[in-house]
Structure formats: structure tokens, C-alpha cells
Image (spheres, rainbow, N blue to C red):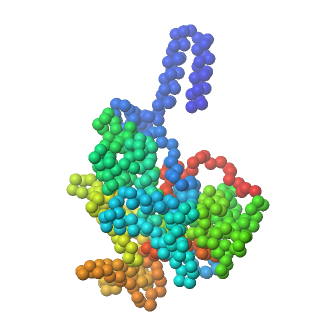
């Protein structure tokens, strides 16, 4: 644009010394030049046609600049790093051998999800779904954290079982007692609430509509919840089909044609989700702080620079940089001079952030990540945004050719091996099913719906491949992964014909592993762990239905568009 203004200035200078007719001609020429340059982005480079014309035609958001940073998130610019154990592998268990990986840019929560954040979720469930009905009561109970995780057979911590979740003294402490499934469901709920707020802010729905339950006036009733995916796929069904009556200023065009904030508008955010193990480890290491030009200066043992858990800065020298177990019987130091300021968990942001601006990536609580656990990362199969756990689904399409929606009386529940009943799908969400040959036929990048076993656990990766594996599996009645790793068959809770609850558990003492497709990775040391586990490369696993007093979680979000937020220059030198 500087060149346009420069030309305009020169032309105006010339016009002062020319005849009136020539001045008119040059003024008209200048106007055309500026107008054509200013409107070029609204012309198609493919056809020359106008985009976003008032007369109709192709409509698109040509003003989009950058993805909005969602509430609570920090931007993490992606890059290349060495994933895995590079320091002090004293166990020599080959659990996370070093391998080179590239991570795409993404966003991650500044802190762990706290009690007050999770209580907002529970409050919403209570407000929307009447608790005097059993089916809705199970929904609420299934979302509740297991507060009994604090109990200790030989220790008195009973006050924590009744106070830790709800007492304001612990409001900004990380939520615990949440299993992997509950963490995933909380983040799905959070996605919908954030996008619901954005639609209201951008005037696509009426202000404060999320608080309204006036059915008689055509507003939202208690069973008509907002779902982002449904809104993008079938917007007319949102809020139980009442979206037209609650449309805001931007949601109505000519008082008759509804306008929705589709994907092309670029307004709604991608889903909140658990970070992958690669993303979490990359964000925890924050190698950007040890970068000079286009290289990293050495390797890091902790999320902070240095070889020790204590601060080396002059003002805070000697202070512990994380909340962890200092030694046997030492969870916080001696009274009056507490070494890390906590005995159990501690309020988030109590310690300095790492070089990405992310807090508590070591200590306080360990954190669930999205991945299914395997001992070795298969970097030969993938070294780009590595993640094990893909289960591809598709929408259920009805006879009318449209995606089917879960109705209020079609709640889908699941019973975990622990006996806890949780909701699988909420009313207003899209019905899903596994992909079939229509999607996999002649594809080279994936061949089935469930890829958790890919190259490690599926029948193709075992010694039985090419033999009568079908008969062998039918005889054992065991999943592929449990056969390969000789792991216990996944426990189940079922109901017999008499209506009695039956709990089945593999009681064999000959199993050699606990690895199944239902175990998930958790990362980072906790308040109960020694300093060894503060290394971001450390990884452990638990069944996805188990909750503890030392595992929490934080959310993440994919980055759409450019890798970075600014043009790169030779900077980010190591700070003195």
C-alpha cells in the first residue's frame, strides 16, 4: 500500500502544474488505481468474479487474519525436537527411546484444569439436566470426580475427601480424581461452551441465550443443548431446532434467510482436547529458551534451564521450582522454611512458568495425555505430529440424506469396569459410527476405523500373522493387543437376564503385561513423585477408567493456518 500512496502523492504534485482537463484525467486515473488495488482481495483469482457481492454469488470471509486464542490457552509454535529420554535413564527400560519428531503449532492450557473450572462444568450439568430424573442423575454422577482417591489406609486425610473439590480454599488447585474419559468429556463440553459464547459475542445468536429456558417464547429448553459439530453440520437443528427463533443480528438476513457461522466464516474455534504426548512433551521442554539462531544449546533435563530443581537466579536463588516429593517422608520441607511451599498439591501459578509461558509442567500433578500407551514410539511409521490413538468415525446419515441427531430420550451411557456409569453422547450431538469400506477402499494412508493397534498389537504385527489367526482369536476370545502383550482381558461390568450386575475380571496370574488398548499415557511428576519423574520425557500409563489423587489434566487446541504468528528473524538468543 505504500507504493500506491507514493504514486498518488506524485500524481497530485504533477496535477498542480497541468491544465484543468489533464488534472481531471489524472485524478480519475488515480481513483481507478487506488480502487482496483483496494478491492483486489474481493475478486476471484480463478474467475475474476466478485466475492461477497451484494448481488449474490460466492460468499467467503476474506477478512480473516489469524486464529483467535481461546480462553486459558497459550500459543506454542511448533518445530523439531528430540522426543524421549536424553538424560538419566536409570531404569534402562527402553520405555521412551530418543527419536526425532516434528510438532505442528498448537495451543495448550496455561495451567492445569482447576477445581473451580471443573465445578463450572458440574454446575452446568445440574442446571440443564433435571436431577430428579434418574437418567439425568446418572449423567451428573458420571461426571463427578472420585473424591475417595484421597483416602489412605494408614494416613488421616479424610478432610480432603470432603473439601478438596468444593472448598474455596482449593478453588485454584488442580482437579484430581478425574479419569481419562472424564477429562475428554470435560474438554468436549468446554468446546461447546466457548463457541456458544463466541456466537453470542458475534451476534449470531441473541445475548444471554445460554441462560434462557423459556420454552413458551421459543427459547432454549433444558434438553436443547448447543453442540459445535452439530451447528457446523446441521445448524438448523441447534438448540433443539430453535436456532431460527433466537438468531442475533448477524444470524438473520432479510428477516427470512438464516445466516450461520459456518466453517467458512472462521469464527468458531477448533475443539478443546487433551494434548498428544508429543505436544505435551514439546510444550514442557520449551527448548525455545535455549535456542540461539537455528540451533538448540544443549539438552534440558527439566522444563526450566539448568541441572537442578532449585532456582539459580539471584533474587530467588535456592527456591524450589516445582512441587514434588523431596525425599522419604519429606513432601515440602521443615516447618517455617518450606522447601517447595506445599505438602499435597498447590495453587496453580505458584512457580515460575517455562519459556513458553506455561505453568506446572513439572510437579503439582501428573497429567493425562491423549495417547494410547506403547513401550516404543514408532518413529519409522511417523515423525510428524506423532499420536497413537486414532479411531476414525463418521456421521450416521438418515434416509433423508442428513446427519442424524441424538434426541433427548436417546441418551447413550456406558458402564466402566469400575462400575461407574458415564454418558457417551449427549442430546443434540451427531450420531457416529465406525467407517467402512466406502472410506477405506483403495486408500493408502489408512485402512480401518480403529488404528490404536497399528503396527503394534494388530494381528499383522504378531507372530501369528499369515496363520489361522481368526481361529486362534476366536478360541481365546481375547483382543489382539492382549494376545500380543499377554495382558489381562479388559474387565467388564454387565447385567444378566435377572437384572443383576456381573463384574468379570481376568484373574490369571500368568500375564506378563498390563498393556491394552484401554491404557493411556500420563506425563510429568506430581506432588507424590521424586525429582526423577519431573523430566518431561518420563512416561507412565494407567487404564483410562482409573482416577488417582495425583493425576490431573490440561486442554490443548490445534492451530489452523500459519505455523507462526509473526515473521521470523534472527532472534531468540539465549538470555543472560
Residue at left offset 52%, top offset 78%:
151
Residue placed most toward the observer, 563 or 70: 70
Q: Quadrant of residue 222?
A: bottom left
In the displayed structure, 197 sits above or below 539; it is above
276 with respect to 185 (left or right): right
Say if 62 sits above or below 177 in the image: above
Determine the residue positioned at 39% across, 50% down: 211
Q: Nearer the viewer, residue 260 or 330?
A: 330
Q: Nearer the viewer, residue 117 or 324?
A: 117
Q: Is residue 50 left or right of residue 322?
A: left
Horizontal placement of 219 versus 40: left or right? left
* Residue 569 x, y percent position in the rendering: 65, 48
Residue sitting at 59 percent across and 69 percent down? Answer: 345
Residue 336 in view in this figure? yes
Image coordinates for residue 441, horizontal then vertical, percent? 32, 63
Residue 227 percent across, percent down from the top left = 37, 54
> Which quarter of the image is occupied by the N terminus?
top right
Rendering coords of residue 252 (x, y %):
34, 38
Q: Quadrant of the C terminus?
A: bottom right
Taking 145 as reference, is 563 above or below it?
above
Count of all numbered marks drawn on residues in the image: 0
Work out whether residue 460 can be spotted. Answer: no
- Residue 157 lies left or right of residue 461; in this view the side is right
Q: Residue furthest bottom?
A: 509
Above or below, 456 relative to 261: below
**The quadrant where residue 395 appears:** bottom left
Residue at x-position 47% and y-position 31%: 39
Residue lying at the far left of the rendered structure: 399
Amino acid at each position: 500500500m505504500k507504493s500506491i500512496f507514493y504514486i498518488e502523492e506524485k500524481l497530485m504534485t504533477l496535477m498542480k502544474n497541468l491544465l484543468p482537463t489533464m488534472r481531471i484525467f489524472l485524478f480519475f486515473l488515480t481513483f481507478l488505481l487506488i480502487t482496483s488495488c483496494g478491492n483486489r482481495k474481493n475478486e476471484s483469482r480463478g474467475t475474476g468474479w466478485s466475492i461477497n457481492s451484494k448481488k449474490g454469488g460466492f460468499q467467503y470471509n476474506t477478512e480473516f487474519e489469524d486464529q483467535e486464542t481461546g480462553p486459558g490457552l497459550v500459543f506454542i509454535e511448533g518445530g523439531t525436537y528430540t522426543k524421549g529420554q536424553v538424560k538419566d535413564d536409570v531404569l534402562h527400560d527402553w520405555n521412551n527411546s530418543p527419536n526425532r519428531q516434528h510438532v505442528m503449532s498448537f495451543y495448550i492450557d496455561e495451567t492445569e484444569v482447576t477445581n473451580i473450572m471443573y465445578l463450572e462444568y458440574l454446575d452446568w450439568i445440574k442446571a440443564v439436566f433435571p436431577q430428579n430424573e434418574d437418567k439425568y442423575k446418572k449423567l451428573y454422577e458420571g461426571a463427578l470426580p472420585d473424591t475417595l482417591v484421597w483416602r489412605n489406609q494408614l494416613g488421616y486425610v479424610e478432610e480432603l475427601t470432603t473439601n478438596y473439590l468444593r472448598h474455596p480454599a482449593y478453588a485454584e488447585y488442580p482437579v484430581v480424581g478425574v479419569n481419562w474419559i472424564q477429562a475428554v468429556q470435560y474438554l468436549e463440553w468446554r468446546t461447546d461452551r466457548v463457541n456458544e459464547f463466541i456466537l453470542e459475542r458475534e451476534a449470531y445468536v441473541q445475548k444471554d441465550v445460554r441462560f434462557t429456558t423459556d420454552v413458551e417464547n421459543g427459547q432454549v429448553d433444558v434438553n436443547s443443548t448447543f453442540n459445535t459439530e452439530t451447528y457446523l453440520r446441521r445448524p438448523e437443528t441447534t438448540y433443539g431446532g430453535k436456532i431460527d427463533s433466537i438468531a442475533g443480528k448477524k444470524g438473520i438476513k432479510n428477516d427470512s434467510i438464516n445466516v450461520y457461522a459456518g466453517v467458512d466464516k472462521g469464527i468458531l474455534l477448533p475443539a478443546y482436547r487433551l494434548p498428544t504426548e508429543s505436544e505435551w512433551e514439546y510444550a514442557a521442554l520449551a527448548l525455545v529458551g535455549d535456542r540461539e539462531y537455528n540451533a538448540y544449546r544443549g539438552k534440558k533435563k527439566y522444563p526450566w534451564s539448568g541441572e537442578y530443581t532449585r532456582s539459580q537466579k539471584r533474587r530467588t536463588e535456592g527456591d524450589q521450582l516445582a512441587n514434588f516429593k523431596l525425599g522419604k517422608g519429606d513432601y515440602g520441607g521443615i516447618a517455617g522454611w518450606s522447601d517447595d511451599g506445599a505438602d499435597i498439591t498447590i495453587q496453580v501459578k505458584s512457580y515460575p512458568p517455562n519459556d513458553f509461558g506455561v505453568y506446572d509442567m513439572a510437579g503439582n500433578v501428573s497429567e493425562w495425555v491423549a495417547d494410547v500407551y506403547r513401550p516404543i514410539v514408532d518413529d519409522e511409521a511417523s515423525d510428524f505430529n506423532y499420536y497413537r490413538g486414532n479411531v476414525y468415525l463418521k456421521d450416521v446419515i438418515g434416509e433423508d440424506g442428513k446427519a442424524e441427531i441424538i434426541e433427548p430420550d436417546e441418551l447413550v451411557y456406558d458402564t466402566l469396569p469400575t462400575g461407574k456409569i458415564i454418558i457417551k453422547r449427549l442430546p443434540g450431538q451427531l450420531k457416529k459410527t465406525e467407517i467402512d469400506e466406502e472410506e477405506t477402499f483403495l486408500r493408502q494412508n489408512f485402512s480401518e476405523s480403529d488404528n490404536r493397534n497399528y503396527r503394534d498389537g494388530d494381528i499383522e504385527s504378531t507372530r501369528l500373522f499369515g496363520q489361522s489367526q481368526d481361529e486362534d482369536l476366536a478360541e481365546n476370545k481375547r483382543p489382539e493387543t492382549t494376545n500380543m502383550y499377554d495382558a489381562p482381558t479388559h474387565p467388564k461390568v454387565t447385567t444378566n437376564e435377572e437384572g443383576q450386575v456381573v463384574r468379570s475380571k481376568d484373574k490369571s496370574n500368568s500375564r506378563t503385561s498390563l498393556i491394552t488398548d484401554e491404557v493411556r499415557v500420563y506425563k510429568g511428576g506430581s506432588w507424590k513423585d521424586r525429582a526423577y519423574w519431573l523430566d518431561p520425557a518420563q512416561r507412565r500409563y494407567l487404564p483410562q477408567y482409573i482416577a488417582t489423587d495425583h493425576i490431573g489434566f490440561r486442554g490443548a487446541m490445534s492451530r489452523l493456518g500459519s505455523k507462526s504468528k509473526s515473521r521470523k528473524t534472527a532472534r531468540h538468543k539465549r538470555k543472560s
